[in-house]
Image (cartoon, rainbow, N blue to C red):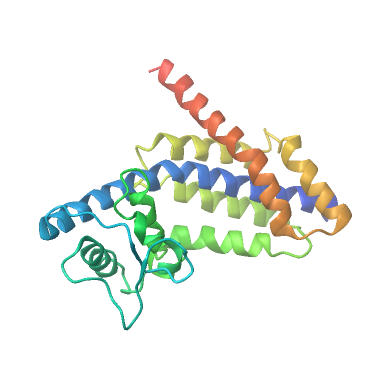
Amino acid sequence: MAESIETKHENWLRVVWGLLYVREGLQGYVDTKGKEQYETFMNNVNGKCNNQTCNQCQVNSKCQNGTTKVTEKSRFRPGHFCDEMNKNIQNNHVRIKPLWTNTDSTKWQDPHDGYWEVAKCYLSTSGYLDKTGPNQVRDIRNKTLHDACYELDGQTADICLDKMITVLEDQQELIYDAFAKQAAIQIRKIKAKTENPPAIMTEPFRKLLRMNLNVEMALTEIEKLMNDRLRKNLQQLIVDGNDYL
């Protein structure tokens, strides 16, 4: 029996909901790995530049921070912190082409934000999404969010959700990650339709359909409403689960 347009909209929304859980489920893992890599870089860098500080050199042409702009003709000062950190970031990128427009190099040494500014150099590049699972989730996101009709058949939606679960249950990297584990459980519920997308998610979507708004704008609104809720739900599920251990 053919699915109704309303059902296909619901399938599309279930996949978007699953993608939000994937992001929340991976956040803790990415944060931990980013800090570990940053600590390695800092040990390497400080061993070569005697722990000197630097917060003025800017490699990102789009960032206003910093008094010294780094270009092809005017590079970092050899032997200084900024130069050594730049080498570590670049040499550890699979294609030796970090995305400098993602980072603020004046904050590379910041004790709070440094690890994230370094990690952002590796975002939005194909070189760090070379595993099959993450590639599939990225493709799901791109195809889903750019579907002009915001529709998916039930079988396709279930396949997409299964791929998300596979990523979150990666046996090498995420087997012991509590957030990833709970996110996978929640996506299974989405697939089984034992939980429906909450009103704070469906209402902006229905507004999108009525007014023919830009999907990215609508999803931004949905994400703002959903992120805190998802994070709190996962944290509570982890606490509740630990109570039974």
Viewer-proximal residue, 64 or 94? 64
Q: Can residue 186 be seen from the camera position used here?
A: yes
Viewer-proximal residue, 117 or 66? 66
Q: Position of residue 161 (x, y in %)?
A: 58, 49
Q: Position of residue 34 (x, y in %)?
A: 33, 50
Q: Can residue 4 be seen from the camera position used here?
A: no
> What residue is drawn where x is 78% and y is 53%?
8
Which corner quadrant of the image does residue 225 belong to? top right
> What residue is drawn where x is 27% and y is 52%?
37
In the picture, measured across the screen, residue 18 lies left or right of residue 75, that is right
Name the residue at the right extreme: 210
Counting labels gives: 0
Q: Position of residue 232 (x, y in %)?
A: 55, 29
In the picture, measured across the screen, residue 139 lies left or right of residue 47, that is right
Which corner quadrant of the image does residue 118 belong to? bottom left
Viewer-proximal residue, 91 or 201? 91
> What residue is drawn where x is 49% and y is 28%?
235
Q: Position of residue 39 (x, y in %)?
A: 23, 48
Name the residue at the front extreme: 67
> What residue is drawn where x is 28% and y is 64%?
89
Name the residue at the bottom extreme: 73
